[in-house]
Each structure stands twice: as structure tokens, then as C-alpha cells.
Amino acid sequence: MGSVGEPVVSPSTAPVRPSPFRYNSPLAQVSLIGLVCFCCPGMFNALSGMGGGGQVDHTAANNANTALYTTFAIFGVLGGGFYNLLGPRLTLFAGCSTYALYAGSFLYYNHYHHQLFAILAGAILGIGAGLLWAGQGAIMTSYPPPERKGTYISLFWAIFNMGGVIGGLIPFFLNYHRTDALSVNDGTYIAFMCFMAAGAFLSLGILPPSRVVRDNGTRATDVAYSNVSTEAVEILKLFADRRMLLIVPAAWASNFFYSYQFNNVNGLLFNLRTKGLNNVFYWGAQMVGSLAIGYVLDFSFRSRRTRGYVGITVVAVLGTAIWAGGLANQLRYTDGVWKDELDFKNSGADYAGPFVLYFSYGLLDAMFQSLCYWVIGALADDSQTLSRYSGFYKGVQSAGAAVAWQIDTHKVPLLSQLIVNWSLTTVSYPLLAVLVMLFVKEGNTGEDGASDYPKS
């Protein structure tokens, strides 16, 4: 095959550019992992976004989420090692298989109101989620060509969050006429379980990096499977790695605000059917936010570092404005009591402000996390290293979430929760800028020194 710059001699000798829609292309594989996450964590997000897992009493969901994020914090860090030992298919299938059990535990809770099953299912899901997200992070950051990582991260985030959109429609339609109901019906949980089971089977279609061919003919990094001792040593090294230490505040903050937003904004301010509708727009806003920041991070300037600085600035300015709006709204119910639940049909103008705020929270979440993944993807190029980096990020993120769900369980004042969330995200921005300045290289070479275009 000739190079891109060669003249065309005849139709028979013209170079054939491989189709991006091939099954072994980065586009197809990133889209597939997006569909897997659409079905599994996407539906989980829709379930959590209703506040209390769809239950009027948030205690069971808070305790289940604490168990979930505690084990997730451990297996998120270890997940990169499992990915390097088992490969993508086994790692992802094992992780995805735990999601339906979690949704089923709330179906059980709907009838018996015993939270032990939900807590155990949450702990098991934390193990599975650690495996899934470490594998997802490695695929999303190592399969695409380096100059388009932001675009592929945005594509993944859009497909993944479509799961939250569809998942929000499920409780909206199934509970539409139950305007006085406090908890969602059985059909809602059964629908979630069906999607989650489908996601587990879809994960078997993911290809290993050695079989993924980019559009320019190069392959994603071909890495031999690792061994336990190597992975143990490499994972321990992460805790002394300056790159990972600089990203700790952003990782801790990136799921910390969910308990506040889901339970104390959507969960407190709106009635049951409106919570489902709000989630449609919350996760829809994530799609918009990820695509917008992906464009900035890939196309705004020639310099990779400059794109990083601009992306951080955009997210910082927008985040400051949104949290300021959240503060203005929170001052309306500092005691944590909202007297009249808002309904999208009957509350008129009173519904508009809180709805826009909740939509904006979704927008910021996607932009913040897409930015973090772009920075991680710019630190290295091979799937082994990026699986460890992604696992570390998810582990720290989950440790923060475990603390946040218990903060809500212990009824910490909502104004204090908001201020802590705002402060954590604000501290993250200058540290991400330092990370870009010190460790993100210009051109096509990652921090690990490997070329972004390995020989096929």
C-alpha cells in the first residue's frame, strides 16, 4: 500500500483507506464499549438519579452505594491489573454481570424492605464496576488515534449517557399516572435488569488491542498479557506517581457530588414522574457537554497543551457559574425541606429554575469527567499503562463517592454539602493545569515515550 501523499496512478494501484466502520476499527470498538456502558452503568445512573434508587426512604440506597463505592475504590485501582491479566472480554463480562443483581435487589426491597440484600448487591457491583471501568478507560484512551482522543471520549460519553436518557424515560412512562406514588413500580426495576443483562452479552464483542486497526493502518498497542507480580508492583507505583497524585482531587470530586445532586436536588424538589423526566434531560445534557468539550480538546488549537489549558478554563468558568446557581437555589431550603414537590405539568414557572439547574449539573459532570479522561489519555498511549491510570482514577473517584453517600446518610446540612462539592471541583482546575504543563507532551509522543503511531 502506498502512503497518503502518493499520487494516484490508476484505480487498480490507488491506496485503499480502510473504512472507519469496520468491526475492528477504533470507531466501532469505542461505539461498542459505549453501548455496553449504555446498558449497564447508564441504567444504573438512571436508577440512582431518581434519588434513593427510586425509594422514598434513601437509607437503603445510601448504604448500598456506600458498600458499592467502597469495594469499587479497591477494585477500581486493581481493575487495570485484572485487565492486563485477563484481557478486555473476560474483564468486561465479569464486571457487567454484576449490574442486574443490583437492580434486582431493589425489586426485592420493593416487597420486603430488607436492605441487607441491597447492601450485599452493592458491594458485589462495586467489584464489577471496578473491572468494567478500568477496561473501559483503557479502550477509550488507547484504541483511538492520539490526535482524536477527545473526539472518541465524547463519542463514548454520548452513547453511554443515552443509557441514562432511555433509563430516565422508563420510570417516567411506567409511573406517569402514579402522581401520588412514593416508590417506583416493579416493572421499572425489571426493565433495568433486562438492559443490564444485554450489556453483559454485548461486552463479549470487544476485541483485544492487537486486533484493532486504525484508519491509517496502524494498530492499537499490541501488549502481551501481564502477570500478577508485575501488576502488583506497577499498581503500587501509582501511589507515588506525581501524575496520579495531581489528578487525585479531580478524581475524588468527580463522583462526590452525585449524592447531593440526585438525593437532595432531584430527590427532594420533584415528584416521582418528574424525577424520571429530569433524568432524561440530565443525561441528555451530558451528551451535549461531552461533545462540546471534546471539540475544544481536539480542534480548538494546534498545540495539545493549549487545548488542554483552554479546556480547563472553559470547564472552570462554567463550573463556577453553575455552582453559584446551585448556591442560590440551595438557600431556598437550607433546612433540607422542600414543602411542595414540583411537577413538570402543574408547577409552571416554579419548575423552570430548579429544572435548568439540574440540567446544568449534568452538563458540568460530563465536561469535567471528559476533561479528566482526556488528560489521562494524553499521559500515555499503550493500553497497559492507561488501564492502570484509568483504574487509579476510578478507584479514587469511588472512594470519594463512598464518603459522599455516607455524608448524606448522616444528614450533613445541604448547604455544607454544596460548599464542599464546589470547593473540590475548584481546587482541581489549577492542579489539572499543572499536570498538563508538566506531563502532556506536544506532538505524537505520550509521557511514557511510546510513539502514538506504532508500527503495524
Image (spheres, rainbow, N blue to C red):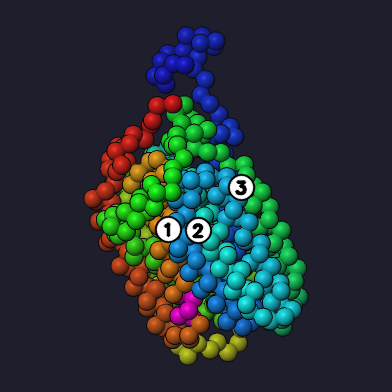
Label 1: state its secondary structure. Answer: helix
Residue occupying image coordinates x 53% and y 38%: 208
Q: Is residue 218 above or below residue 53?
A: above
Range of the magenta residues? 404-408
Q: Position of residue 165 (x, y in %)?
A: 61, 60
Q: Position of residue 407 (x, y in %)?
A: 45, 80
Q: Is residue 368 left or right of residue 171?
A: left
Label 1 to label 3: alpha-carbon separation: 21 Å
Label 2: state its secondary structure. Answer: helix
Q: How many marks?
A: 3
Sort mark 2 into few (<14), some (14-19) or many (20+) by Cα contacts within 10 Å.
many
Q: Which residue type carries mark 1?
A: Val
Q: Main secondary structure of the magenta part?
A: helix
Q: Are marks 1 and 2 in contact (CB under 8 Å)?
A: yes
Question: Which numbered dot is residue 153?
Answer: none
Which residue is denoted by mark 2 in the rendering?
130
Residue occupying image coordinates x 68% and y 81%: 113
> Which image quarter holds the C terminus?
top left
Label 1 to label 2: alpha-carbon separation: 7 Å
Tell me where residue 114 sits by quadrant. bottom right
Question: Which numbered dot is residue 77?
Answer: 1
Which residue is denoted by mark 3 in the rendering?
203
Magenta segment includes 306: no
Sort mark 1 into few (<14), some (14-19) or many (20+) by Cα contacts within 10 Å.
many
Point out the tag, 3 or 2, that comes first from the N-terminus: 2
